[in-house]
Image (cartoon, rainbow, N blue to C red):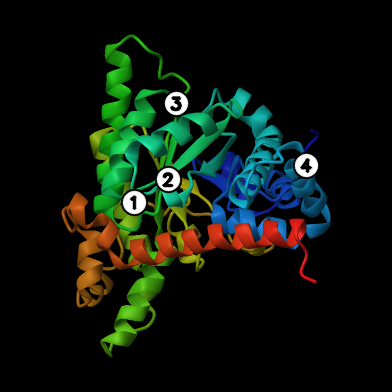
């Protein structure tokens, strides 16, 4: 693929800083444009997959029917997930030159494990290994729950490159990073290579902000609304520093983009920023001049203000949640339910293609 790069703040940052830009979508048209902005990765999840298929029914309707015809005993779920896998493999192909040039550090396409497996560590690890084998540059998402942490270590040991997801707190990020390190160390102890294994650990900064805003509303807390825009940024800056101090191989990834701070306060760091394409366009069309602020602490007055929210403290402190509490945290429950609902929506969409309503 010949790339005609689009000059702008994103491309400048990609050329002058270690910050990696990923596209928060596996839509091929968006991904091609993201690569032109300097993007070096992309992601998919049940919501993204469903949305892409729903927005391109003219493309995916015939393809889903062809999958069904080739596999006459398959149910709607298997057919829908095959479409997601096909979508992911095609997106991965666009990123393969970047993957090869960077020796696996960049150029990866994220595929998320089925959220319906969230209670079964072995099933998650097995599916992660299956997805890992779809293409050389696949990276696999597993949620940062107690069961997920177990699966993350096991899948890493098997050689799967992991992107931890459904993660909103410093505690989840750090425990996930530790699990990956254990998996890597087990491989090294057995003489297995980790040279091309470059995992990432996501903190869904915008979803943390969303949750704390809803908590402030629920409790009728009188708080500067501007301070609530900083919670996710504060959490990921802290996690980033911990990863540097502990020498984790994983990079931190910022996802669930909601505001410009989630770019301007993180650019310059050796991490991944994964905005939706509409935000990437907005940044690249601006006159923003990238300035490294990753090591600039969030104003202590903002942190003190946010500490009035109990769930901010849980999210910000490295021991704010126990592993047993990860799946009970509000944003975790909300996001898992959303991903599970997207699975059901995908089943319904496949049904509409195969058995149109009378």
Report the residue marked by disc 1: 295
Foreground mark, 3 or 1? 3
- Left or right of 179? Residue 339 is right
Image location (x, y in percent) of residue 233? 37, 61
Relative vertical location of residue 79 with respect to residue 212 in this rendering, above or below: above
Q: Is residue 13 above or below residue 52?
A: above
Q: Are marks 2 and 4 in contact (CB under 8 Å)?
A: no
Q: Position of residue 355 (x, y in %)?
A: 75, 60
For marks 1 and 4 on the same chain, the one whose residue lies earlier in the sequence: 4
Viewer-nearest residue: 174 or 339: 339
What crowding class fits label 2: few (fewer than 14 Cα within 10 Å), some (14-19), or many (20 or more)? Answer: many
Q: Counting residues from the N terminus, which is met first, the one under dot 3 or under dot 1?
A: 3
Q: Is residue 354 left or right of residue 251?
A: right
Residue 285 visible, this orientation: yes
Under tag 1, what secondary structure? loop
Which quarter shows the C terminus?
A: bottom right
Q: Quadrant of the N terminus?
A: top right
Which element is circle 4 on?
A: helix
Mark 4 neighbour density, 10 Å: few (under 14) some (14–19) many (20 or more): few
**Counting residues from the N terminus, which is met first, the one under dot 1 or under dot 2?**
2
Residue drawn at the location 31% of the way across and 15% of the way down: 188
Kindly identify which residue carries mark 4: 69
- Callout 3: SS: loop
User: Residue, x 48% and y 51% (percent of image)?
Assistant: 267
Q: Earlier in the sequence, mark 3 or mark 2?
A: 3
1 or 149: nearer the viewer: 149
Q: Residue at x 74, y 42 (%)?
A: 67
Give the residue pinned by disc 3.
Answer: 197
Secondary element under disc 2, as helix, strand or loop, is: loop
């Amino acid at each position: 693929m010949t790339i005609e790069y689009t000059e702008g703040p994103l491309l400048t940052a990609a050329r002058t800083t270690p910050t990696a830009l990923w596209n928060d979508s596996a839509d091929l048209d968006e991904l091609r444009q993201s690569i032109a902005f300097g993007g070096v990765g992309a992601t998919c999840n049940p919501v993204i997959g469903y949305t892409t298929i729903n927005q391109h029914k003219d493309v995916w309707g015939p393809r889903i029917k062809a999958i069904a015809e080739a596999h006459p005993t398959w149910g709607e779920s298997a057919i829908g997930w095959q479409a997601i896998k096909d979508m992911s493999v095609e997106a991965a192909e666009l990123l393969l030159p970047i993957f090869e040039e960077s020796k696996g550090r960049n150029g990866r396409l994220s595929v998320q494990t089925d959220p319906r497996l969230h209670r079964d560590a072995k099933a998650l690890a097995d599916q992660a290994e299956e997805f890992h084998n779809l293409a050389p540059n696949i990276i696999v998402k597993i949620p940062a729950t107690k069961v997920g942490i177990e699966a993350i270590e096991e899948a890493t040991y098997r050689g799967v490159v992991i992107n931890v997801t459904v993660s909103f707190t410093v505690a989840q990020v750090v425990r996930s990073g530790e699990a990956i390190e254990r998996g890597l160390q087990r491989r090294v102890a057995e003489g297995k290579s980790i040279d091309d294994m470059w995992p990432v650990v996501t903190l869904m900064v915008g979803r943390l902000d969303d949750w704390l805003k809803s908590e402030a509303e629920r409790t009728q807390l009188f708080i500067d609304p501007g301070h609530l825009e900083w919670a996710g940024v504060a959490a990921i800056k802290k996690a980033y520093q911990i990863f540097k101090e502990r020498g984790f191989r994983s990079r931190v990834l910022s996802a669930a983009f909601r505001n410009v701070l989630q770019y301007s306060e993180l650019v310059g760091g050796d991490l991944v920023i994964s905005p939706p394409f509409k935000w990437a366009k907005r940044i690249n069309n601006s006159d923003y001049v990238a300035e490294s602020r990753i090591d600039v602490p969030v104003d202590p007055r903002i942190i003190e203000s946010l500490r009035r929210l109990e769930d901010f403290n849980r999210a910000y402190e490295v021991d704010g949640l126990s592993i047993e509490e990860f799946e009970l945290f509000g944003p975790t429950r909300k996001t898992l339910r959303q991903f599970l609902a997207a699975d059901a929506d995908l089943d319904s969409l496949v049904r509409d293609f195969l058995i149109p309503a009378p």
